[in-house]
Amino acid sequence: MKGKITKKLVDSLEPDPARDVLVWDTELAGFGLRVSRGGVKSYIFQYKFQRRARRITLGEHGRALTLNAARNLAVARRLAVQAGGDPATEAQDAATAPAVRDLGTRYLAEHAAKRSKSTQRSAAQFFRLFLLPALGSRKVASVTWADLEAIHQRLAHIPYQANGLLSLCSKAWSLAARWGWFPRDQPNPAHGHDRYPERVRGQALDREQLARLGAALDQEKSGSIGAAAFRFCLLTGCRPGEARAAAAVERDQRERDLPRRQAHLRRRHGEPETVQQPEAEGEDARGAGSLQPTYKLLSSASRR
């Protein structure tokens, strides 16, 4: 069926229970209206690419897509075809293009994984708390400066996180351009934002302040773990996490040196250098194991 597609015609068309109803516009080649058997009215565009007929759906008729808007879309598709484009293929590529959630997964797996544990946790939190709720389903190539600026403004009450999010996005979209997920000829959407001022944290103590701090630590109870840990960090410059890591390394080293120290103590006290065998399973093993002497590592303090 052919005819000039007008609003009156669109409103008057009724569905056919046996088949879809197609109306092709006589003024714009390829522009048409389809009425499904269920009564859904959609605008369509048909063209030829490499001598093959292709058809795409422009959208469903309604408030979101009026007749005039659909006609303008059809004109744009016609111009794209005349320029050598294939709107159907482009639409398929756009539908399968990576989204921001895909960018987050790849960023954490290929970039953040090479950084420290704290950097990995921070990057994962930025995506989980801020980026994915706002832009998770958006295509990476469609994210604009305004999208990131809106998130940045919502985080004005936490300036450190707001500025850190921009730094992460700057790297993430740079990688997206390298991976072919974001056009290289477009500016990075994380660039050009006004960052919030950050209050400088911490200060260097002078001699008087160090003396007062030392006096306060001296007033703590003897053997205070907290005071000892504070002194360790103060004298070495370690962060608490670095101090815990150092303690773990030292503990592992002591456990590796335990057999050697046991042998040294046995030689020192004239005891036979018999290595304790691990307990085995079964009655025979228990009987054999009971014949092996058992030794306990005694500290030098307990020996005195």
Image (cartoon, rainbow, N blue to C red):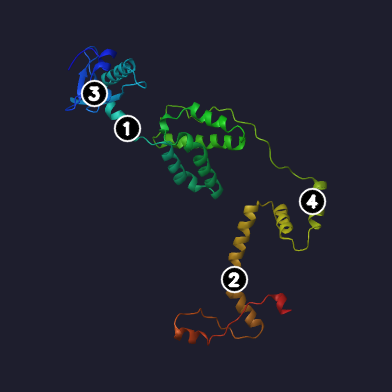
Helix, strand or loop status at disc 1: helix
Residue 200 x/y as whole percent = 68, 38
Q: Earlier in the sequence, mark 4 or mark 2?
A: 4
Q: What is the number of the mark on residue 213?
A: 4
Q: Is residue 96 left or right of residue 169?
A: left
> Residue 300 is drawn in which quadrant?
bottom right
Answer few, some or many: residues within 10 Å of disc 1's Cα (few below 14, many 20 plus, some between 14 and 19).
few
Observer able to see residue 182: no
Cα separation, mark 3 vs mark 1, equals 27 Å
Q: Earlier in the sequence, mark 2 or mark 1?
A: 1
Cα separation, mark 4 vs mark 1, equals 64 Å
Tell me whether circle 4 and circle 2 mark residues in contact (CB < 8 Å): no
Cα separation, mark 3 vs mark 2, equals 82 Å
Type of amino acid under label 4: Leu
Helix, strand or loop status at disc 4: helix
Cα separation, mark 4 vs mark 2, equals 37 Å
Cα separation, mark 2 vs mark 1, equals 61 Å
Q: Is residue 128 left or right of residue 199?
A: left
Q: Which residue is mark 1?
A: 93
Type of amino acid under label 1: Asp
Residue found at x 25% / y 16%: 12
Residue 278 x/y as whole percent = 51, 78
From the viewer's side, name the closer residue of 45 and 294. Answer: 45
Q: What is the number of the mark on residue 257?
A: 2
Looking at the image, residue 204 lies above or below residue 278 = above
Helix, strand or loop status at disc 2: helix
Residue found at x 62% / y 63%: 250
Residue 238 x/y as whole percent = 66, 52
Type of amino acid under label 2: Asp
Q: Which residue is mark 3?
A: 35
Q: Earlier in the sequence, mark 3 or mark 1?
A: 3
